[in-house]
Amino acid sequence: MDLKGTAAIVSGGASGLGEATVRDLAAAGCKVVVADLNEQRGKEVAESVGGAFARTDVADEDSVAAAVAAAESLGAPLRVAVSCAGIGWAARTVGRDGKPHDLASYRKVIDVNLIGTFNLMRIAAAAIARTGPADADGQRGVVINTSSVAGIEGQTGQVAYSASKGGIIGMTVPAARDLAAIGVRVLTICPGIIDTPIYGTGPASDEFKARLIAPVVFPKRMGTAAEFARLVRALIDNDYMNAEVIRFDGGIRFQPK
Ligand SMILES: NC(=O)c1ccc[n+]([C@@H]2O[C@H](COP(=O)([O-])OP(=O)(O)OC[C@H]3O[C@@H](n4cnc5c(N)ncnc54)[C@H](O)[C@@H]3O)[C@@H](O)[C@H]2O)c1
């Protein structure tokens, strides 16, 4: 799908994978709404690409409806929604101290990562459906969701995060089938270990990241956010990609320990 003269919305667009996606889509000719909780950074990113910022909590209905309305009012048809907003969480089902996993934090991770992704997908797809077809196939747009390889293999001590990301994988095929009637494709990317602010900064984080790359097969390094954004663009470009879950991970397979 040609992105020139279209609009897009990217949740989590103020940082990391979302920010790189915003920059890449803007370079391809999209007007982009950066939908993020982080107002200061979100505004900076949006301004730097001539887009717009919408302070958004993806888990909140009204907030996402307002962000999508902002994308619809950019003066170009809304064709792309990319969900990159997400939070990490580390806790075991039963902790080393014998206490069960806190239920409120489990709910929070599901709320932001899984329900937040569905919330943007459903509201953005309804808006995309209001546009005219973009091509002879009757295509109107593309939704790209961000899961994780943790959603496929699971990770020790990340039961809430893995469940939230597995849920995103589970939505991919039914959502693609639901949205076929309006000409919207749905794809899910499962990143492995990608260098973004989610891992923090400074010497302790550098040490942590160095340990994380040990199981990466090749190339033996973390992925970059720019590489993620290139994959998003490739998936949008290729009209025959639909209802698929794509690993983006340098061959990593998470082990139990
Ligand atoms: N970096 C990796 O290695 C990696 C691997 C697998 C999956 N992922 C997933 O990719 C996505 C992006 O991660 P990242 O590494 O770029 O992280 P990041 O922390 O750099 O960016 C996440 C962004 O989401 C925003 N956000 C958080 N909660 C939000 C909410 N409720 N509403 C709106 N915005 C919210 C944050 O403000 C931030 O700007 C996440 O879903 C993450 O789980 C990342």
Image (cartoon, rainbow, N blue to C red):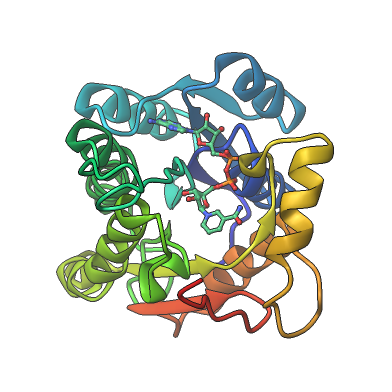
Q: Is residue 12 left or right of residue 160?
A: right
Q: Where, by quadrant of the figure, is residue 47 drawn?
A: top right
Above or below — where is 112 with respect to 134?
Answer: above
Above or below — where is 185 with respect to 9?
Answer: below
Single out the residue that lies furthest toward the top: 40
Q: Is residue 49 left or right of residue 231?
A: right
Q: Nearer the viewer, residue 237 or 130?
A: 237
- Provide residue 204's location: percent of width, then percent of height: 77, 40
User: How many numbered tags mark residues here?
Assistant: 0
* Residue depicted at 25% across the width and 45% down the height: 98
Q: Where, by quadrant of the figure, is residue 145 drawn?
A: bottom left
- Provide residue 32's location: percent of width, then percent of height: 57, 38
- Provide residue 46's location: percent of width, then percent of height: 65, 27
Q: Where, by quadrant of the figure, is residue 209 drawn?
A: bottom right
- Provide residue 131's location: percent of width, then percent of height: 32, 50
Above or below — where is 177 with respect to 159?
Answer: below
* Residue depicted at 44% across the width and 42% down the height: 86
* Residue depicted at 62% across the width and 74% down the height: 249
Q: Nearer the viewer, residue 155 or 137?
A: 155
Q: Nearer the viewer, residue 111 or 252?
A: 252
Q: Is residue 26 left or right of residue 207?
A: left
